[in-house]
Image (cartoon, rainbow, N blue to C red):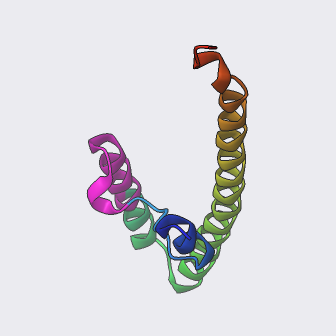
C-alpha cells in the first residue's frame, strides 16, 4: 500500500492548511475577524459572552459540515476527471 493511501486509511493526513501556508490575504482576513470578535466580546457581559460563544460554536460546526461536503465533492470530481482522462489514454499511442 502506498504511503498516502495508508495515511488516508489511518486518518493520518493533514488536510487543513497551517498558518504558515496562508496567503497574505487569508492571513489578513483571519486577523481582521479575530480583531472584530475580540472587540465585540469586550462589550458583552458574562451571560452575553456565553451566548456569543454558543453562536460561534454553532457557526463553526456548520462550517465543518460544509467543508466536509466540499471535500467529498471535490475528491469525487477529481476521480471523475481522472476516469475521463483515462478514457482517451489509447489515443496517444501510435498503432503498429
| Residue 20 is a magenta residue | yes
Q: Is residue 13 left or right of residue 48?
A: left
Q: Is residue 5 left or right of residue 39?
A: right
Provide the major secondary structure of the magenta segment.
helix
Write the residue at 65% across / 37% down: 82
In the foreground, 77 or 23: 77
Q: Is residue 90 left or right of residue 30?
A: right
Q: Most extreme residue toward the front, as rendered?
A: 96
Indicate whether 22 appears above or below 95. below
Quarter assignment of residue 96: top right
Q: Is residue 2 left or right of residue 28?
A: right
In the foreground, 37 or 82: 82
Quarter assignment of residue 64: bottom right
Which segment did they paint magenta?
18-35
Write the residue at 41% across / 55% down: 33
Quarter assignment of residue 37: bottom left
Across and down, in percent, residue 90 comes to: 66, 23
Amino acid at each position: 500500500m502506498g504511503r498516502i493511501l495508508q495515511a488516508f486509511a489511518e486518518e493520518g493526513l493533514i488536510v487543513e492548511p497551517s498558518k504558515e501556508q496562508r496567503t497574505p490575504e487569508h492571513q489578513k482576513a483571519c486577523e481582521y475577524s479575530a480583531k472584530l470578535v475580540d472587540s465585540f466580546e469586550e462589550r458583552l457581559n458574562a451571560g452575553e459572552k456565553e451566548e456569543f460563544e454558543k453562536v460561534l460554536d454553532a457557526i463553526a460546526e456548520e462550517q465543518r459540515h460544509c467543508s466536509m461536503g466540499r471535500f467529498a465533492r471535490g475528491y469525487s470530481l477529481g476521480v471523475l476527471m481522472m476516469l475521463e482522462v483515462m478514457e482517451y489514454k489509447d489515443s496517444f499511442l501510435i498503432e503498429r
